[in-house]
Image (cartoon, rainbow, N blue to C red):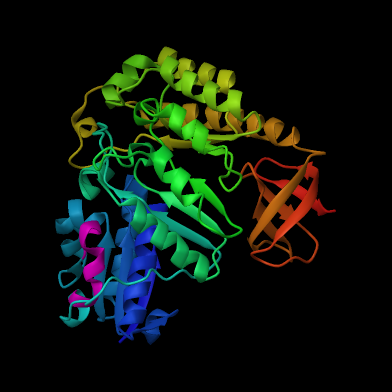
Amino acid sequence: MKVYLETYGCTANKSDESLILGILKEEKHEIVKKIDDADVLVLLTCTVISTTEQRMLSRLKVFKKTNKKIVVAGCMPSVQSDLIKSVAPDALLLTPQNTHRINHLITGKETAQKTKKYFTDVIAPISIAEGCLLSCSYCITHLARGKLKSSQIETVVSDINSALNQGCKEIQLTAQDTAAYGFDIGTNLGELLREVTKINGDFRMRVGMMNPSEAQKILPTILSAYNDRKIYKFVHLPVQSGDDDILEKMNRKYTVDQFIDILSRFREKYPNITVSTDVIIGFPTETDEQFKKTVELIKKVRPDIVNITRFSARPLTKAKTMKGRISTDKVKERSKFLTELCRKISNEKNRENVGKIYDVLVTEKGKNKTFTGRAENYKQVVIKEKVFIGDFVKVKIVDSADTYLLGKLI
C-alpha cells in the first residue's frame, strides 16, 4: 500500500514516527509525500493545548474529504476518541501504546519481528520511556500515554546504534520526563547516559525535558554523566510558575527554591550550559502578584529559552474544573509582557557567545542558502559558507540574534 504520514507535536511523536516508518518499510509499503498519491493516510496527533487540538481536527477534516482509509495515531486516540469519531467516524485509532501494531491495523497482518526504526535525516529522536510518574493537574498527555514504562538500557543502545548506522549524527533522547527514566526498572537516567556515551562514533546527544521533581532525586548522577563530550550542555527544566502556591495547585511536586537549586548546580558544573524552561501563563486563580513572582524568577535565573504557554483547559484534567479562570485579555497582556522580557534576555545571553569558538554539528539547510547546526551547548548556529549536513565544523561566533548565533568557519 501507499502510505502518507503527517506528524505533529513533541519528539516522542517523532520517535513514534520513526517506528511507524520502520514497520511500513519492513512490510514493503511505499511511503509517499502527497495525500493524493496515498491509499492510507496516517495522522500522528498532539492535543497538548486547545489550539493544537483544533489544528488536528482541521487536518482530519481534510483527510476525511479524500474518502481514503485514515489512521489516527498519537495522543488523541487515547483521550479523545469520541472527538475523532465525530469528524471521521470510519477512522482507525492507534494509541501510543500500540504504535507497533500499525501494519495490523491497515492490513490485518501482525509484524513478526522487532523492526528497526527508520530515520529520515541526521537527527534521530530516540524514546527512552513512555508515560510519566507525575499527574500534573493541567496535563492531558500523562492521561494519553499512561504510567511510566522505561525501555531497557540495551534497547536504547540498540536503537541508537541503528540510528548511527543510518547516518544520524544527533541523538535526541526523549520521554515525557527523561529524569524519571528507569525508576520502574531499577536504574536511572545517569546510568543510561553513562552507557550510551560508550557507543562508538562521532555524534552528539540532546537530553530531553526533565521535571525538577524527579531530577532532584538523582541529580549527582545526571551531573556526572553530562561531563561526556557527546552530551550537549543543554538542560530543559520546566518551572511553569514562580509561585509555590500555583505550583502546588499544578501538582508539580517541587518548590521554586528547589528549581533554582537544580539549575544552580548545573551552571556551577557547566557554566556555558544552555537553559530552557517552560512557563504557563494564567493558570486558574493566578493573581497579579503571583505572576510578578514568575517574572522575578525569570529575571533571576535568566534562561536562554523560555517556552511560554497560555493556560489551556484540557478535557479530563483537574484544572479544567478549577474555579478562578483568568480573563483572556489579562492572560494575553501577561503573555506579551513576559515574551518581550524573555526575548531581551535571550538576546543578551546569545550576545555573550560572540567571539567564542565552537565545534558545530551541521544538521539542516537554513534560509537563503545558509546552513544551521548546533554548538556544544546546543545553541543554534547559522553558517553562511558552504558546509555539509552531518559534518562537524569549527566556527567563530561573529554575531548573534534572539534565537541563533552567526558563525564563521575557521
Q: Is residue 374 above or below residue 160?
A: above
Magenta stretch: includes residue 370? no
Position of 270 with respect to 220 (left or right) is: right
Query: Residue farthest to the right?
Result: 410
- Which image quadrant for residue 388? bottom right
234 in relation to 108, above or below: above
Give above or below for 111 relative to 268. below
Q: Is residue 350 visible?
A: yes
User: Magenta segment: does it hold 100?
Assistant: yes
Residue 14 visible at all: no
**Which image quadrant: the N terminus?**
bottom left
Residue at screen point 16% across, 73% down: 90
- Tell me the chief SS of the magenta region: helix
Query: In front: 165, or 374?
Result: 165
Residue 231 lies, in percent from the top left, at 56, 45
Residue at 44% x, 15% y is 257
> In the image as oriented, which residue stretches furthest toward the top?
289
Q: How many numbered marks are there? A: 0
Using residue 391 as the reference point, say whether residue 290 is left or right of it: left
Nearer to us in this view, 133 or 13: 133
Position in image of residue 117 (x %, y %): 38, 68
Query: The magenta stretch spans which residues?
Result: 94-104
Horizontal side, residue 279 vs residue 103: left or right: right
Left or right: residue 403 versus residue 101 is: right
Q: Position of residue 54 (x, y in %)?
A: 32, 54
Residue displayed at 40% across by 41% down: 191
